[in-house]
Amino acid sequence: MIGTSQSVGTGLSLSGVIGDNETMASWPDRRLLDLLQLEIPIIQAPMAGSDSVALARSVSSTGALGSLAAALLDPDGVRAAVRAVRAGLERPLNLNFFCHTMTEPGDAAREGWKALLRPHYERLGLDIETVAESRLRLPFEEAMCEVVEEIRPEVVSFHFGLPAPGLVQRLKERGLKILSSATSVAEARWLEGCGCDAVIVQGFEAGGHRAMFLETDVAAQVGLFALLPQVADAVSVPIIAAGGIADARGIVAALALGASGVQMGTAYLFCPEANVSPAYRQALREATDTGTAVTNLFSGRPARGILNHYLRETGPISESALAFPYAATMVAPLRAASEKAGSPDYMQLWAGQSARLVHAMPADQFTRKLAAEALSRLHAGYS
Amino acid sequence: MIGTSQSVGTGLSLSGVIGDNETMASWPDRRLLDLLQLEIPIIQAPMAGSDSVALARSVSSTGALGSLAAALLDPDGVRAAVRAVRAGLERPLNLNFFCHTMTEPGDAAREGWKALLRPHYERLGLDIETVAESRLRLPFEEAMCEVVEEIRPEVVSFHFGLPAPGLVQRLKERGLKILSSATSVAEARWLEGCGCDAVIVQGFEAGGHRAMFLETDVAAQVGLFALLPQVADAVSVPIIAAGGIADARGIVAALALGASGVQMGTAYLFCPEANVSPAYRQALREATDTGTAVTNLFSGRPARGILNHYLRETGPISESALAFPYAATMVAPLRAASEKAGSPDYMQLWAGQSARLVHAMPADQFTRKLAAEALSRLHAGYS
């Protein structure tokens, strides 16, 4: 674990930005900093398939919190990734897991999904009858819990609720801090009641999978501006704002609405350390404010991504989409063909609504810049 | 017109809240205040059917901007309402108009709409073959322009774009300030290019009609948190944040994201001066963060309201909805029957996503409280 003596003194120097007498103690709300032993209240969002060891290392090195999504990794993959992040770096790390329930879809559902996808296969000259099995996103279970108890990441975050109470309890007994995301006041209260040390408040603007686990109606999902203060009024644990935050203005606004910190995903996709293909990078650079939508056409669960041919032609929400995570298998060949051709038509281009605000630079530099600018705005005041 | 000498000195006293040496000049961004001759950068949103002379008077009396929606009024109605607001009060007033295009739907479209509504009529024991004509929302045109030139409200705001360039020009030549709402960067740029003096940035959280006039895809509409800074970066005129703002935290956050002021609607519906029925008031008091959705089932255009039986059963978005504003006529009997029965089932319950944040009090008192709390938060700083 990271001791206070190690994390203080190696921090970001803001001399010249906010004056020599200011230190990292100048963040107005220290609840999240103290809870997670951070110096900067920014969490790099875990992004299965797009985050990387280099990205998490770079972010954690600044005193902010780097994250690794483990949903697509097996136990050895998790061990190796965490070892690589920690080589020569004593900083907190967040390991992220999905905790959905796997319910094998029946034949009728599979046929419905196939019928919807068939024209797309034909358009790309692919055969829908010969789809190979692909790696499915797996939920956090007993075996992985043992790995996590062995590795002891400082922070464990979950998506789609929480795993069985016994597993959460085991992690908490080891001193690990537990986070999960809420898309409503009801979900935030539930997570607090189940022992989360802090709650990530995911606004409708967020890229990637909606955390929804009690909520079922995508049309009623809430914007960050409205959701943050309502959750702040409803729970006692620190809250972390997520969705549409991509610059220092967003950090300052999130704090004003009651957050103790922020989680940023899309912004970090622009960093060279992110595992993002050239075609994905180009789509991100060209994304506009109205260029994304929430779709269930890739995994079966609602997630925000850049509108492309597939989403525009089909939905973006379809009742024929197979249940999560099974829908992904039959979409994989479309994605692969699209990626190979350098075309965005069937690519899974997760992104939030603020891609336009981002300027690409290395993750550590970007994190320090965000912190310095936010502190400068906070301390400049409005007089 | 209101002179500076009249609007200064009668303002809100914040003594004891932010210290005796602070004055209204302490708002960090004076662009909107100076443009519209205000002392408080808050606009009470025009709300056709729910705003009132008493509400606009009460808000304008504080140095904020009261608004009257004129979409359901004829010229004499507009004259009478403005006279009533101005009796003994020399403060700026905003008159609001819709500027849509009226395209009479054909018989097939009418039959489709009737088919969708028939089960609802049957449920309420009403006869769909004997629907009376109802007053339609009319766009701003030549005749109303003459009335506005005669009345000279200090501010004229439009929804759904702008009227013909010649009409806008005539109002500007009279010295009236022109506002309109944007739901995207593209719409904001268009409005600035057409001569708007300030642009209202309408987040997806907002209650009532989406201002969409270039945008057509509801699924791609943008949350306020993401939209504000992107519009701030794209236009030079002052911007006004709207959607999900219901307390001082929201005002401070909007300013941090680049707004020069805010427009609030739902929050003012809780004031006793608002023209809101007891059943509507109760629905507002009970509204939760996830209790609203954008629907086209009342007017034919997307608008956010509280989810009720009608929306849950039918949509909330249907391709069968008749074009705006014609859809409203055939919904009117359902709404009336529901209202009469004190049931929310078919009521048009426009509301944004932050109703839960509001505490009901008289509009002038509420406005002063918002201003004092926002100034206090801004000047307390974060040190």
Image (cartoon, coloured by chain):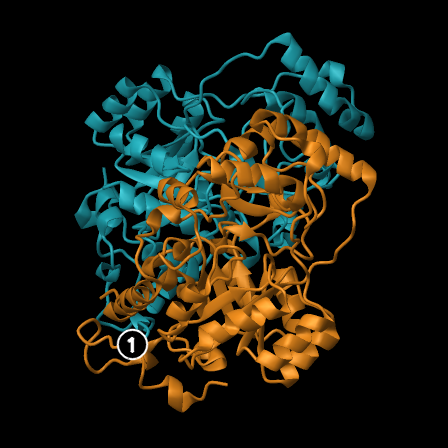
Chain colours: A orange, B cyan
User: Foreground residue, B211 or B85?
Assistant: B211
Identify the chain of the residue marked 1, using the numbered disc in the image: A
Q: Position of residue B283 (x, y in %)?
A: 65, 48
Q: Quadrant of residue B321?
A: top right
Q: In the image, is residue A236 above or below residue B364?
A: below
User: Foreground residue, B101 or B64?
Assistant: B101
User: Foreground residue, A307 or A1?
Assistant: A1
Q: In the image, is residue A84 above or below residue A334?
A: below
Left or right: residue B187 versus residue A183 is left
Q: Position of residue B331 (x, y in %)?
A: 66, 26
Report whether residue B188 is seen: yes
Q: Quadrant of the N terminus of chain B?
A: top left
**Dot 1 lies on which element?**
loop
Q: Residue at x 26, y 18 (%)?
A: B166
Q: In the image, is residue B330 above or below residue A81?
A: above
The residue under label 1 is which amino acid type? Answer: Leu
Q: Quadrant of residue B29?
A: bottom left
Q: Residues within 10 Å of mark 1 (few under 14, many from 20)?
A: some
**Residue at numbered disc 1:** A12
Report whether residue B64 is seen: no
Q: Residue at x 38, y 62 (%)?
A: A251
Q: Position of residue A134 (x, y in %)?
A: 65, 49
Left or right: residue B115 versus residue B139 is right
Left or right: residue A156 versus residue A354 is right
